[in-house]
Image (cartoon, grey):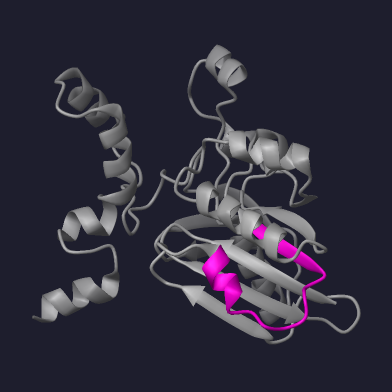
Amino acid sequence: MKILALNAGSRSHRAQLFAFDGIPSLEPPRAAWDAADESATGRFAELLETYRGEPPDAVVHRFVHPGPELAERIAFRIDDEARSLIERSDLAPAHNPPALDGLRAASDRFGGAIQIGISDIALGPDAPAIATTYPLPHAWRERFGIRRYGFHGISQRDALERNARLCGSDDPARRVVSVHLGSGCSIVAGRGRFIIDSTMGMTPMEGLMMGSRSGSIDPGIIFTLLRRGAIGKDELERTLLKESGLAGVSGVSADIREITAALQA
């Protein structure tokens, strides 16, 4: 069995092919094919053009937030209905468009392969209500579906599972803190293999300062800027997503390597 995994990030894209002999285990074999676009400006179609092997049996896609109807399912088959739900989701604007680009490219290139989606939310149906509930009016939460989802669920669950194996303890009460650092950053609290809280919220913008995302800020800042007419809604969203975090603080880049080089110079 050959499984191609596509990971669309906010700043880079990656594709890896895994060849399994029998049922896949928790420790997949070394990638049989690996390709990356570190600029996040290229398209998955061009990335997949470099693949010359046998077509995969399945293509797995990471969706940061595939929409409320799909978010709490760890894996789901992508049919027309699922694709429509993903396209309507507006909670991961920096991630879903390139992921959908990857879905289109893989569907065109490998028409016979099964397309599978993986939700990247961290706070699933088993998470405690105290971790998923915002201190907002009940009517808002019910009417608008406002809740905390957390993200980096794939990475963070893998970290908790590996921690249990490495420490030789599968105690469900074992308390673990896991830190995910990259262009996007999050910290989760775990009990055994399960995530019980996350610094990220309804969207991937909440929490720690990130590469180009602000993380949590006083919401009054936003209302003050809007009230003064200092910035428009679209510019505000772009600034908080693309020009804040490390990029905003440093005034140089969202890439820590470039910031370090600037410091040394």
Magenta-drawn segment: 45-61
**Residue 221 percent location from the top left of the image:** 22, 30
Is 53 inside the magenta-drawn segment?
Answer: yes
The residue at 57%/65% (across/down) is 45
Count of numbered badges drawn on the protein: 0
Image quarter hosting the N terminus: bottom right
Image quarter hosting the C terminus: bottom left
**Residue 108 percent location from the top left of the image:** 69, 59
The quadrant holding residue 262 is bottom left
**Residue 37 percent location from the top left of the image:** 46, 72
Q: Residue furthest right?
A: 22
Nearest the camera: 47 or 229? Answer: 47
The residue at 77%/81% (across/down) is 54
The quadrant holding residue 107 is bottom right
Q: Residue 93, relative to residue 221: is it above or below?
A: below
Q: Residue furthest left?
A: 265
The residue at 31%/50% (across/down) is 242
Is 260 inside the magenta-drawn segment?
Answer: no
Q: Is residue 192 visible?
A: no
Q: Is residue 147 left or right of residue 30?
A: left
Q: Residue 41, relative to residue 235: is it above or below?
A: below
Q: Residue 263, relative to residue 191: is it above or below?
A: below
Nearest the camera: 219 or 95? Answer: 95
The residue at 64%/54% (across/down) is 104
Nearest the camera: 78 or 248? Answer: 78
Q: Is residue 136 visible?
A: yes
Nearest the camera: 63 or 187? Answer: 63
